[in-house]
Image (cartoon, rainbow, N blue to C red):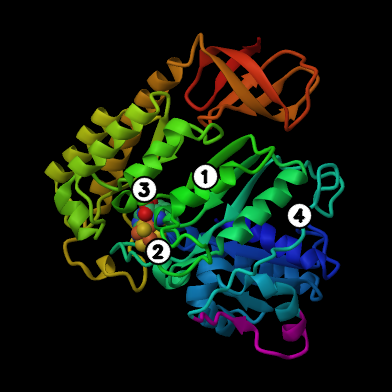
Amino acid sequence: MNIRDSEIMAQSLSRYGYVEGMDLQDADLVILNTCSIRAKAEQKVMSLLGYLRKTKEKRPDMKICVAGCVAQQEGKTIIDRMPHVDLIIGTQNIYKIGEYLLDAEHGGNRVKTNMEDQYKIPAFLPDVPSEGADAADDNAPFQFSRFVTIMQGCNNYCTYCVVPYTRGREVSRRAQDIVDEVALLVRSGVKEITLLGQNVNSYARTNEVHCENSNYNFSSLLREVSAVKGLKRLRFTTSNPKDLTDELMSCFKDVDNLCPQFHLPVQSGSDAVLKAMNRKYSVEQYLGQVEKLREYCPSISISTDIIVGFPGETDEDFEGTMELLEKVQYHGSFSFKYSDRPGTRSSEFENKVDEEVKSKRLARFQARQDEIGLERNKEFIGQEKEILVETVSETSVKGRTNTNHIVHVNEPVDTKPGELLRVKINFAGQHSLKGELV
Ligand code: SAM
Ligand code: SF4
């Protein structure tokens, strides 16, 4: 989501004459697009801002802008403590970044974090550059895989999570706007689209998305987007299991360009912990969903998010998470130590787990996941797969399977980024596969 927000800011600013670049030393404007999901991410922002103070002392004309969730939550404190910051831009204000920068330059308010209960994603996002003319930087490669935001915010209030506070109430974007944006991207050369939202499964639940069909839901959107002519691959993220329907799972059986890949965050393998997290599903229900997904699509690659050391998590609860890992045999997972976030309900819970215990549990979980991930990767050996080419050199090609596995082909191939190649997998490592051209 942050990647897409950064793109939107860059695209908006190109209309104001800004050119995207990565070199801090030459930059006229530095934007820190921040994440506050865990305390560690927020600490990094604060230390980077300290470093930028020194850069700005040498180049006082350089502008510094802080965007994203840390800006939304801590914006007023940052501007009071760090006078070298020129603009704070909240999660719902990114679409007007150019206008707000000009306003701040002319003495206007430097903190733009207002959130209103209204639809904020504009119908038409900034123009999409076409293949061969990507970004203002001529050297930037065209991105054949793009994200499209379908909703913002979240209403679920999982007790540990800061998102409902930093990104506001859940609002779904108009279906027609989404389909139009996808069609525009595909016409410009994009091959793969990932639909984005905090809980895509509840798309169209909280507001009208202007469709004739009042039962329009995420499955309807998925089918409509999949029918965009020329779209080769379709993905989505993220899903909360509590809203996962049979209708959505069945899309994996018959929507041809829907990639066989599902990120289904479970968070814990203990019903008691899931209840304390306010996740609203049980381990048994979750396992039922995994089974069904595999019935509909036997080749589906399933990944998850795990939090270890949630307040009150006992050894027995953690064993439940390890058991779940054995049962599901995930292709991959993102696992984190529980971290207190300001304003969340769990930050007030008293039965916090010792840091050392959290670290041990995380290490044990990750070590076992690594073993399972490698075993799952080895299952690909001998199989023929189609990869979407990402980079090409004189001696090798890198691409991705529809299950989202990276594949290296270490031979010269006459191809270019954005093409689809058939390869036979002959080696599986922890983080990627190797293959040969078929
Ligand atoms: N909407 C998704 C869902 O319902 O599962 C999750 C999106 S959240 C931005 C990404 C992940 O960050 C979560 O799945 C969770 O594992 C992790 N996370 C969120 N808050 C956390 C916290 N306070 N401590 C540790 N991990 C956290
Ligand atoms: Fe956070 Fe996801 Fe829960 Fe929303 S559904 S509160 S984004 S973890």
What residue would you read off at disc 2?
205
C-beta proximity under 8 Å, tags 2 and 4: no
Separation (CA) of disc 3 from disc 4? 35 Å
Ligand 1 sits in which quadrant?
bottom left
User: Where does label 1 land, which residue?
Assistant: 223
- Residue 300 vs 58, above or below: the answer is above
Q: Magenta residues, as a range?
A: 102-116
Dot 3: what SS?
Answer: strand
**In this rendering, position of residue 286 left or right of residue 13:** left
- Distance of mark 2 from mark 4, alpha carbons? 29 Å
Name the residue type under label 3: Phe
Dominant SS in magenta: loop
| Mark in the foreground, 3 or 2 | 2
Image side of residue 29 versus residue 219, left or right:
right
Residue marked by disc 4? 128
Q: Is residue 141 magenta?
A: no
The local crowd at label 4, few if under 14, some if 14 to 19, many if 20 or more residues have their Cα within 10 Å, is: some
